[in-house]
Amino acid sequence: MISTLAIDCGGGGIKASVLDETGTMRARPIRIPTPYPLPPPLFVETLRELAGRLPAADRVTVGMPGMIRHGVVVATPHYITRAGPRTKIDSSLRGEWSGFDARSALSAALDLPVLVLNDAEVHGAGVVAGTGCELVLTLGTGLGCALFDGGRLAPHLELSQAPVRWGQTYDTYVGEHERRRLGDAFWSRRVRGVVDGLRPVFQWDRLYLGGGNSRLVRPEQLARMGDDVVVVPNTAGIVGGVRAWTLIPPD
């Protein structure tokens, strides 16, 4: 039976567990704070040390924030900062991360086949039904996005970096910082506004709201979004690590 080490890398924390072919966790998930500043070598070493604390696996799935193409980092919003999300960007880190072949580096460090994807894409792999147009939005440090058509992953769009209003991007408009500033009630209204605004853009058959903050969306706002919008557990970011190899096979 093939086992998968699934690692969910966020702006504030990194979680990992080992799962069997059915997606059942074989070990209690481990979570550590994301270290900053975080150059690529430290990122690789952090994940290697995390893997060493878990049972041996046959393959690895890594979800991380940003634009990832074929396992190579095009851009990542948090890991180029000096001390974490919303802190000053370090230009040298930006240069180190741009074009970093995360899949090759992690495969060499772990001596295993590795799949590196945007974290929302891994999350989506854990929840999509595989029929119709399915959009996944993850609410956490910022906003993650993944689009599936008939179970096939569409090219990634960094929706989080698109402008919304008042000079804010989606990342800042509905991210954790704003949730804390506004409170859950007003923040939930913002989330509903984002969903309403994106509906004519994507024309989805089903929208999944995931990520650590999705459970904080107020029921009355969720009800107004429609029956085609559902909240899914944050554990999908790890559980999706198994199914990702079927829905999103490595090239």
Image (tube, rainbow, N blue to C red):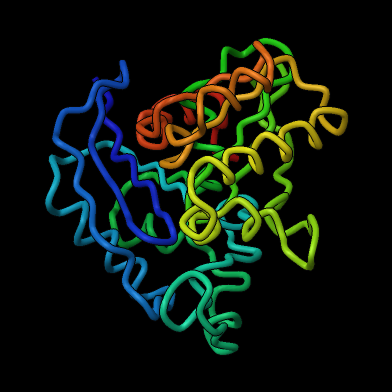
Residue drawn at x 42%, y 64% is 105
Look at the image and tell me in which quarter the C terminus lies: top right
Front residue of 217/114: it is 217
Q: Percent position (x, y) of residue 192?
A: 67, 34
Classify 101 as above or below 122. below
Q: Percent position (x, y) of residue 205?
A: 73, 14
The number of numbered discs placed on residues in the rendered structure image is: 0
Q: Is residue 114 left or right of residue 156?
A: left
Classify 143 as above or below 129. below
Residue drawn at x 59%, y 80% is 94
Residue drawn at x 29%, y 40% is 5
Q: Residue furthest right?
A: 200
The quarter holding residue 224 reads top right
Q: Percent position (x, y) of residue 17?
A: 24, 39
Q: Is residue 27 left or right of residue 222?
A: left
Front residue of 218/13: it is 218
Q: Is residue 27 left or right of residue 205?
A: left
Residue drawn at x 46%, y 59% is 104
Look at the image and tell me in which quarter the N terminus lies: top left
Classify 219 as above or below 238. above
The quarter holding residue 249 reads top right
Classify 176 as above or below 121. below
Front residue of 240/197: it is 197
